[in-house]
Amino acid sequence: VLEQASFAHASLVGVYLTNIRDKPATADFVSFKGANMRQMHLTDGVIWYPDLRGADLSHSRSEDIWIISGDCVGASFTGITWVDGALESSNLVGANFSRTSVTNMNLNGARLDNATFREAHVTDTRFNNAHLHGVDWRGTIGAEKATFTGAQGIIPPLAVHYWLNLALGSRG
């Protein structure tokens, strides 16, 4: 049980964190503020209200991890591979997702203002009702098929083109 534990500024390089989905295995309100979480392996879990401010998750692997209402301001997700999961309703202002690969992710309601998705691979991801002011989408691949219903801010130009053409019934 990791509930209300603090790993603030800890070095968790290469650590495996798995099976934290159902009670008694919980990880709600955990602090990873400023932690070095590079190359971590996170699988099969739901974490409510974590503090990931300034944490470095670069080059980590995440599968079926759902972070709900996390505070991730300034966190680095550079080069992370994240399959099936969420950062739903999380505060990701200024977060770095450069060269990240995200598949089947739910970023609904997230605050991603001034986040960076440079050269990221985005597949089957939802940004519905997200705040995207000042987001850097340069070189992002796949975001054109992501959903942005109700999103505010900068939507990738290819996504605007894709959805506009789809709405107009053309494919060109």
Image (tube, rainbow, N blue to C red):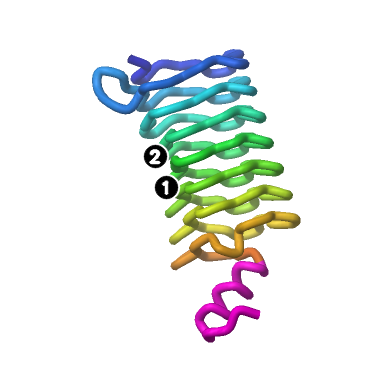
In the displayed image of the protein, which residue is found farthest to the left?
23
**Residue 116 appears in the rendering:** no
Do the residues under discs 1 and 2 have CB atoms within 8 angstroms? yes
Total count of labels: 2
Q: Residue 156 placed where, x, y %?
A: 64, 64
In the figure, is residue 155 to the left or right of 111?
Answer: right
Which quadrant is home to the N terminus?
top left
Q: Which residue is mark 1?
A: 89
Mark 1 closeness class: few <14, some 14–19, many ≥20 residues within 10 Å:
many
In the figure, is residue 33 to the left or right of 70?
Answer: right
Residue range of the region highlighted in magenta in the rendering: 157-172
**Residue 117 appears in the rendering:** yes
Checking the image for residue 68, the label placed there is 2
Magenta segment, prevailing SS (helix, strand or loop): helix
| SS class, disc 1 | loop
Q: Residue 26 placed where, x, y %?
A: 32, 22
Mark 2 closeness class: few <14, some 14–19, many ≥20 residues within 10 Å:
many
Which residue does the image show at 60% across and 28% down from the upper left?
60
Which residue does the image show at 47% across and 56% down from the upper left?
126
Per the image, is 101 magenta? no
* Dot 1 or dot 2, earlier in sequence: 2
Which residue does the image show at 43% across and 36% down from the upper left?
67
